[in-house]
Image (cartoon, rainbow, N blue to C red):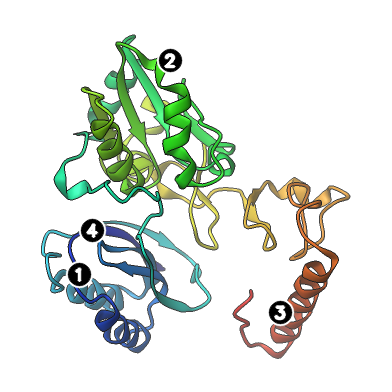
Amino acid sequence: MFTVAALYHFTRFDDPSSLKGPLAALCCTNGVKGSLLLAQEGINGTIAGPRDGIDAVLAHIRALPGCAALEWKESHAPDMPFGRMKVRLKREIVTMGQPDVDPRAGTGHYVDPAGWNALISAPDVAVIDTRNDYEVAIGTFEGAIDPGTKSFGEFPQWWEDNRHRFHNKRIAMFCTGGIRCEKSTNYLLGQGVQDVYHLKGGILKYLEEMPAEQSLWNGACFVFDQRVSVEHGLKPGPHIMCHACRRPLWPEDRTRPEYEEGVQCHHCVEEFTPERREGFRERQRQIRLASKRGTSHFGG
């Protein structure tokens, strides 16, 4: 079994580019794959590997400036869920596009999974899912509002257009692992909203700790690796991924006439040019050839 660690931490990195090389080298040396984002506002990502390798990388990150209090969420996968290791420099570790938003200055009230059901069941609470539309489509909490956003950067405009709906309401927000809510709750506080809450540890922590028979979660939770989705107990879900548009699919979606493995699905059949699709087909051919040789291909 591979250990999968999802992590983020907001802190100040004066020179994130100086952290990239040593972090990438350590991951590769220890058989760790995945994706880590570095920016001046901190670090974010998901990695997978052997237990000793994950421990070594987490110890390295905790030793970075301001990261001693790093928290992470773990799950397990029978197969390596990533094809390679990527450490990237970004303007933001989760892109909202609001320069005045700073979670270090304050966030909403954290609510543990044990107290989440009572909060979102209260009649004066509006529950908002801050994830993208394709994530919400495969699972969310009962009664949650779906903003229908295609990217997190659309959330501020959605709030501006809909804030009138939430007069005299307490706001409870949630996302996959908690990072988007760090920014969205700080944003709402800056907009004058008084009572803002968010699920500590996100959906992943809730699915890990909440017994299925007591859960208010419906469906599966999209994750950004080759598992595609997880369910209660963080067991891998039933979904597969379209490797053209990266949206989750049910296994039966492969029988739809629009589906071509690695090239398109019913969601993206009208989204790419013929040239892009031919590129996808070539990638898929290379994946099949690598499989026959018993080797791996980055695109797979």
Q: Earlier in the sequence, mark 1 or mark 2?
A: 1
Place of residue 53 in the rendered image (x, y in percent of width and height, measured from the top left): 30, 78
- Secondary element type, mark 4: strand
- Secondary element type, mark 1: loop
Q: Disc number at residue 9?
A: 4
Reading the image, the residue beneath label 3 is 287
Confirm or deny contact between disc 3 and disc 2 (CB under 8 A): no
Q: Confirm whether residue 264 shows in the render.
A: yes
Q: Residues within 10 Å of mark 3 (few under 14, many from 20)?
A: some
The residues tagged by marks 3 and 2 sit, at their Cα atoms, a distance apart of: 49 Å
- Residue flagged by tag 1: what amino acid is it? Phe
Place of residue 120 in the rendered image (x, y in percent of width and height, measured from the top left): 33, 21
184 shown above or below 85 = above
The residues tagged by marks 4 and 2 sit, at their Cα atoms, a distance apart of: 32 Å
Asked if residue 39 lies left or right of residue 224, the reply is left
Residue in the image at 43% along x and 15% along y: 165
127 shown above or below 99 = above
User: Residue 226's image quarter?
Assistant: bottom right
Reading the image, the residue beneath label 2 is 165
Q: Earlier in the sequence, mark 3 or mark 4?
A: 4
Place of residue 300 in the rendered image (x, y in percent of width and height, measured from the top left): 63, 74
Q: Nearer the viewer, residue 189 or 205?
A: 189
The residues tagged by marks 3 and 4 sit, at their Cα atoms, a distance apart of: 35 Å
Q: Nearer the viewer, mark 1 or mark 4?
A: 1
Q: Earlier in the sequence, mark 4 or mark 2?
A: 4
